[in-house]
Amino acid sequence: MIKVAVIIEPEAWNSFLLSQPEGHLLQSYQWGQLIERQGGRIYRLVALENGHLVGAMMLSVVALPLPSPFLQHNVCWLYCSRGPTVTSPHALTVLLEQAHALARKEHAVVLRLEPNITEDDPGRDDWMAIYRTLGFKTNPLAIHGRRSWTLDLRPDLDFLFANFRKTWRYDIRIAERKGVTIREAENEADFDAYYDLLQCTSQRDGFFIHSKQHHKEILRLFSQTGDAVLYLAELEGELIAAKMLIRFGEWCYDMFGASTDRDPSLPKTHLLQFRCLQWAKEQGCLYFDFRTIPEVLKPGEEMWGVYQFKKGFGGFSRLHLQTQDYVYHPFIYTLWRWSVQARRYLRRAKRKRAFWKER
């Protein structure tokens, strides 16, 4: 018999995630701590069979971004990012029963799951059928990008380097010859310089970044176990690029990156990215997750240039299962979804106009 419990023991939680192929950083105990320390609320649920973990699901309670003066209660939605992680359909069913109870308690409009199941998973179609049977509907509007770029780190470093795009290998050597150096951040001043550069990059390239405290807390939480590093690339003592990495089990995640627009002819990030791959191998990682690339791989799509950069280091794309929504309040859900669709359509149209104008 499977029963559900609330777990607060970090080692047991992470050990289970790391024992499963679907275990993901965004379901880790530390990620939950990050959400809580930024003022958010979470629930950690586990499924137990004969005292052994067979399922884990971390849910975030998120306020609904719609004005609701006509509603009796403040409403929210429950979100499970890259989860749940389960060993069987029965474990999933038991976890969802508890999640539905929490949704009623929280007056949730929808329970949204984004499982860490990819198109190459042999059980993908079975899981899709299970979610449909359990009452979920597919939502094409993902919170986390569905497609990511991954590099298999198991070959030796020389083999990996030889499979970089020729221009990328040249750019790495050029950066070394011109005196670009890579070092780990050592103090508060280094972190401040990283975040200042990240802000400049965000303003220049038009992407959202979290608060400085959010970044600082991520680095602190994962550095405690030696699972995070912040690299700085410098030229003549000036910061020109930076990257933050996190290791979770066999995976290394390329979390955040920034670069200056100084000297456009200088390849600033290629050498830095190569050092990131070296660090991941040194930590024993088997896979490097460059994270999000465009879901549709066509010129003009958001992050197309970023995708071309990542692709130059070799690897392959992974497409995750579509977002799964269990809707409790259809009317409010539909209003919210329409507003999200409208915003995304306008943003995409603006981006495409800018892309083709530059051509």
Image (tube, rainbow, N blue to C red):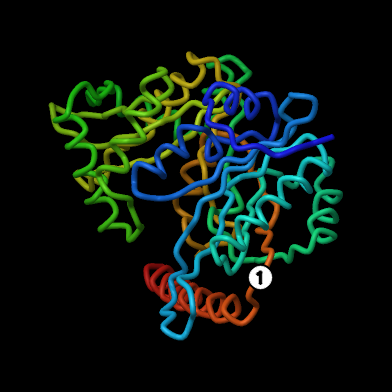
Secondary structure beneath disc 1? loop
What residue appears at the point 61 percent right and 82 percent down from the top-left corner? 331
Who is closer to the viewer here, 232 or 5?
A: 5
> Residue 224 falls in which quadrant of the image?
top left
Q: Which image quarter is the C terminus in?
A: bottom left
Question: Does 243 sit left or right of 315 as displayed?
Answer: left
Q: Position of residue 44 (x, y in %)?
A: 57, 40
Q: Which image quarter is the N terminus in?
A: top right
Above or below, 20 relative to 138: above
- Which residue is identified by label 1? 328
Q: Residues within 10 Å of mark 1 (few under 14, many from 20)?
A: some
> Residue 263 falls in which quadrant of the image?
top left
Who is closer to the viewer here, 256 or 308?
A: 256
What residue appears at the point 51 percent right and 17 percent down from the top-left corner? 281
Who is closer to the viewer here, 78 or 284?
A: 78
> Which amino acid is tagged 1?
Tyr
Q: Position of residue 205 (x, y in %)?
A: 32, 57
